[in-house]
Amino acid sequence: MDCIFCKIIAGEIPSYKVYEDDKTLAFLDIRPVNPGHTLVIPKAHAKNIFDVSPEDWAAVTESARIIAAAIEKGVNADGVNVMMNNREHAGQLVDHAHVHLIPRFKGDGLKLWPQKPYPEGEAESTAEKIRNALT
Ligand code: AMP
Ligand code: ZN
């Protein structure tokens, strides 16, 4: 399979590894938002959050919890964003599931997504659509 992150797991291409256990690997993002920006991935190839197994997702999120604290301490950050892009139109460029851990610094100027209020009635109908999809 031609997957760049599987090649990193296999050691076929280099990475700056920061953490590894039996189910997950974490390494520095090569083009960081801020120094210390880290990617946490399942070792078993999965395309995205829709594809990853519950066990591997649990392992990834637990690794993310541990590493977020290490990043904040290690690079003396003022906070950490946890983010994930799933599918092309959500900004996913590498089709091996990965969670971004982005250290944040007071005044670093990074703007997150713009938000807006719901038009009248749309919050209830939207919540209903999601509740229905769960059943
Ligand atoms: P996404 O847009 O969520 O798919 O993010 C993919 C991320 O992978 C980007 O932030 C890239 O900078 C990062 N990336 C791509 N290739 C490598 C690599 N060889 N080593 C480390 N990070 C990489
Ligand atoms: Zn892969």
Image (spheres, rainbow, N blue to C red):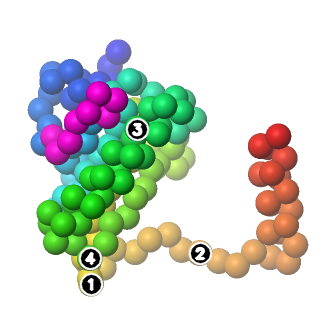
Is tag 1's residue or tag 4's residue first in the polypeptide sequence? Answer: 4
Mark 1 sits on what residue? 107
Question: For the residue marked with disc 4, what is the amino acid?
Answer: Asp
What stretch of residues is rendered in magenta? 17-24
Mark 2 sits on what residue? 115
The CA distance from mark 4 to mark 2 is 23 Å
- Residue 45 percent across, percent down from the top left: 40, 24
Mark 4 sits on what residue? 78
Is tag 2's residue or tag 3's residue first in the polypeptide sequence? Answer: 3
Secondary structure, mark 4, is: loop
Q: Quadrant of the N terminus?
A: top left
Front residue of this view, candidates 131 and 87: 131
Which residue is depicted at the point 33% across and 66% down? 80
Instruction: Find out if the beta carbon at label 4 lies less than 8 Å from the nearest ligand 1 atom.
Output: no
Mark 3 sits on what residue? 59
Front residue of this view, candidates 57 and 105: 57
Which residue is depicted at the point 21% across and 29% down? 8
Q: Quadrant of the C terminus?
A: top right
Q: Is residue 33 above or below residue 2?
A: below
How would you rate the neighbour count of disc 3 (Cα within 10 Å): few for under 14, some for 14-19, many for 20 or more? some
Secondary structure, mark 3, is: helix
Q: Is residue 101 above or below residue 53?
A: below
Question: For the residue marked with disc 1, what is the amino acid?
Answer: Gly
How would you rate the neighbour count of disc 2 (Cα within 10 Å): few for under 14, some for 14-19, many for 20 or more? few
Disc number placed over residue 22 in the picture, else none: none
Secondary structure, mark 1, is: loop
Question: For the residue marked with disc 3, what is the amino acid?
Answer: Ala
Q: Is residue 58 above or below residue 85?
A: above
- Residue 96 percent across, percent down from the top left: 39, 32
